[in-house]
Amino acid sequence: MRRLLHLSVLLAMAAAASEKSGDPAASDRGNSDNMQERLRRAKAAEKRLAEAMMSEDIPTVKSILEERVLNIDVARVKSDFLLHHAAAYRKLEILKELLKAGANPNLKDVHHRTPLSYAARDGYHDVAVALIDANANVNGTGSASPLFLAAMHGHAHVVKLLLSRGADHSQRASDGSTPLILAARDGHTPVVRLLLDKDKSLIDEKDVHGFTALVYACQDGQTEVAEELIERVMGVRARSSQTPQQSSREFRRCDEIQGADVNSKSVSGWTALHKASQHGHEDIVELLLEASVLVASIHYHHHHH
């Protein structure tokens, strides 16, 4: 009996000593329990926040953010980071609350896109302003950059904003394409004008294939853009601004056309005229031929006067 009593006293003393000295094993167990509890609370908060953001319940969003139990740059709504989701779905007030709570406006997702990239892609001027005012980087990586995405999708008002806030208008994607090339290819004339007003030398930029913005406009049948670019190249309007009428004469093949090189050749020797002819864009061929006649006339007068 005395031995059992002695053992119980020793155990009690050991427990007391452990509490005073901070027994490592006991401490580890306590830390583990605390960590698990924090993780549980963070997961619960993330779920509640996602639901509140989906339903745009702003008071609940604010309340959860004020708890400060989750990392707002790690938490997600479905597969999206919180700020990316708010930007992509134009949830402006929620986006502002996230920024106020310390969300990183330059966080990149798996596609190397920032929240501003998504605002630019979808033409959300108000969201873009809020992000830029929170020190979002107006530049990015190649085709994931805000200016590329805004130009590609024809959002002239966002392009204008980005240029006014210092976006690099000469940036390139991995294939050498520029915002101007993308805008020209997809027929976004207002964007083309904004970019060329910013820097007229962009018209001469080529991608890895040696194609300029004019070549892509001619290839893809973007008549209005082609006319704008030819006017910029020539310094004059090649024809009236009215919609060109389809020519009734038989369409001439590119190998039957002489001396219509109004722009430089690509790596493979293609010109804007070749591409317009190859794809059957008669109205653009007429534009290019008229421009080539003017070029020939200018050269003639230059050499004979």
Image (cartoon, helix red, strand yellow):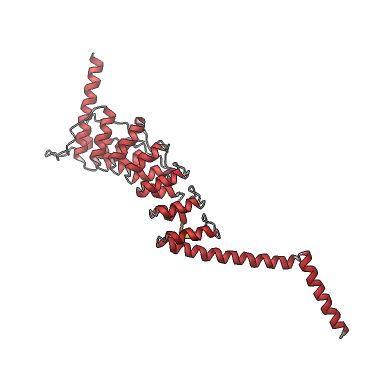
Q: Please say whether residue 109 is visible from this viewpoint.
A: no
The percent coordinates of residue 162 (x first, y second) are 39, 40
Comparing 62 with 235, the one in front is: 62
Image quarter of residue 53? bottom left
Q: Is 124 left or right of 221, judged from the image as shown?
A: right
Q: Classify 225 as above or below 13.
A: above
Residue depicted at 78% across the width and 68% down the height: 18
Outermost residue to the left: 248
Outermost residue to the top: 305
Q: In this figure, what is the number of numbered marks?
A: 0
Image quarter of residue 89? bottom left
Q: Is 60 left or right of 287, judged from the image as shown?
A: right
Quadrant of image for the C terminus:
top left
Residue depicted at 60% across the width and 67% down the height: 37
The percent coordinates of residue 138 (x first, y second) are 44, 42
Outermost residue to the bottom: 1
Q: Is 188 left or right of 105, judged from the image as shown?
A: left
Q: Is 169 left or right of 302, judged from the image as shown?
A: right
Q: Please say whether residue 126 is visible from this viewpoint.
A: yes
Quadrant of image for the N terminus:
bottom right
Residue depicted at 40% across the width and 52% down the height: 92
Image quarter of residue 223? top left
The percent coordinates of residue 73 (x first, y second) are 52, 54
Residue depicted at 26% across the width and 37% down the height: 226
Comparing 224 with 21, the one in front is: 21
